[in-house]
Amino acid sequence: MTDDSLIRRSVRQARRFEARDLPAALAAKAALCLVDALRCQLEGEALPMSLAARQIISTTGEVPVFGTDILSSPADAAFAMAVAAAALLREDMHPASIGHHGIIVWPTLLALSGISTKSGADLLAAGVVGYEFGGRLGAALFDADLASRLRPSAFSATAGAAMAGAHFLGLDEDATVAAVALAVDASSGLNQWARTGGDEVFIQAGRAAQTAVRSLLLAQAGAVGSATLLEGESGLFAACGRRPPLDLGLFTAEPVISAVYNKALPICNFAQTSTQAAIAVARAPGFDHRRVSRIKVAVTEAARGYPGCDFTGPYDRPLQAQMSIQFGVAAALARGGVRRDDFEALSDADVIRLVGVCDLEADPAFTAAFPARQGARVEATLDDGRTVSETRDALTPATEEEMFAGLRRDGERVLGAAPTRRLLDLIATLPDLPDARELLRAASIQSLTRQPQRTT
């Protein structure tokens, strides 16, 4: 074909990026993002939505669902793995696209590895491609206003996962265009969940990976998509009231995945820095949260304006607390840190009192520095008039050591010590691994004594 659509130009740019050209530093970054996605899956495997997802998927198939005893179809395996990865709200973040790509791209590729024989280097390169296309698309499409209504990851990461999967499977240009177009057409996700604490956010991640896999398999079977689905008169940009770019410019600047960071706390991205600042305040010598009479929190306009982030309750569901900047700050001040359990105690008297004296505002300097930096300031006034404050110009992401420690800890809990060591060994040698499906095999507990994950 001779069309010069935005999807086709992006496909041609992506196809020029090959596994053998993957620099060592980029391979290491991709492997770390994969580690984070695997850590998230294992950490969230017993949470309610993960259990629900595993109850509804097919159990007749050949693809292992990572960290379980289930064999399923490629699309259903991708669905279950993505839901588990999203279940704790600890997913990775690309600020420019306001997107969480890893919880969708990696489950898609893991599911596809179960039906293909591709190398670890192929897996990493495809992951880089998925972040690149999804990140560039999301950055061009979304601003704070649109992101207040539509879930960025549900659109851009779905497209990125389809592009990644096509690269991984080695689809030709026309089939890749079709797969991406079909995936974009099936994308959906509203942001009302952030205001109500609904479970849509987790299902959106699962549906995105499932959609990417189904679109790829349909394209392989000969389905044709609309190449102008992005910039066409009735395409995605027009539907969102946005002007499409002339070109997404894949790999014309620093790769998107290089700008991705991994969350240190199991809360919304926009609540991370303020909560980290609050932890520092709580650990100041002599600080006593019982003496706090007023709290002032300054964040970026993007953080203050994101649905669910400026919310003082009542908190009916844990997700509402995980989204709320005020709750995160209050929990950190009351407890000196933040754990998942803090967002289950929704009526904790100490936390609710502090939420009630918390004022939130947007700071012009923090706003101007976003998305390159995500700053915040927390100032606690005590009953004697003294103040304790902490300013952070940027959030502190999870470290490589923390991510590997989390993967090891939850791997040993779910899989056992020996399979976890095998999994970590495979990750360490991933660029040289001949068959990427070994990752799923290492994390399959088919042969271990374990009660089935499904219930009747």
Image (spheres, rainbow, N blue to C red):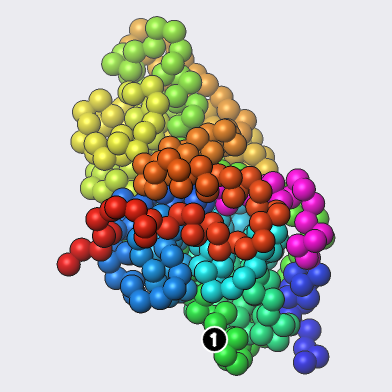
Q: Is residue 362 among the parts visible in the rendering?
A: no
Q: Which residue sits at x=72%, y=82%?
A: 172
Please tell me which residue is depicted at 56% across the width and 67% down the height of the picture. Answer: 113
Instruction: Please name the residue that numbered disc 1 is placed on.
Output: 218
Name which residue lies at 41% across and 19% down: 282
- The percent position of residue 147, horizontal first and vertical second, equals 51, 59
Instruction: Verify whether residue 228 appears in magenta.
Output: no
Residue 188: % across, % down: 46, 72
Residue 19 forms part of the magenta stretch? yes
Give the camera-side residue of 305 and 231: 231
Q: Which residues are magenta?
A: 17-35
Q: Is residue 276 shown to the viewer in this render? A: yes
Q: SS class of the residue under badge 1? A: helix
Task: Please give left or right for residue 277 compared with residue 129 in the image.
Answer: left
Q: Is residue 265 left or right of residue 315?
A: right
Expressed as whole percent of the image width and height from the top left, the position of residue 203 reads 38, 64
Position of the C terminus by quadrant:
bottom left
Count of numbered circles on the image: 1
Q: Nearer the viewer, residue 361 or 246?
A: 246
Using the image, determine if residue 175 lies above or below residue 399. below
Q: Magenta stretch: dominant SS?
A: helix
Left or right of residue 411, residue 29 in this image = right
- Percent x, y for residue 369? 67, 40
Between residue 199 and residue 399, name the one nearer to us.
399
Above or below residue 17? Residue 337 is above
Question: Does 367 appear above or below 191?
Answer: above
Residue visible at 49% across and 59% down in the picture? 441
Q: Quadrant of the N terminus?
A: bottom right
- Please, what is the three-letter code of the amino acid marked with disc 1? Leu
Q: Image quadrant of residue 135? A: bottom right
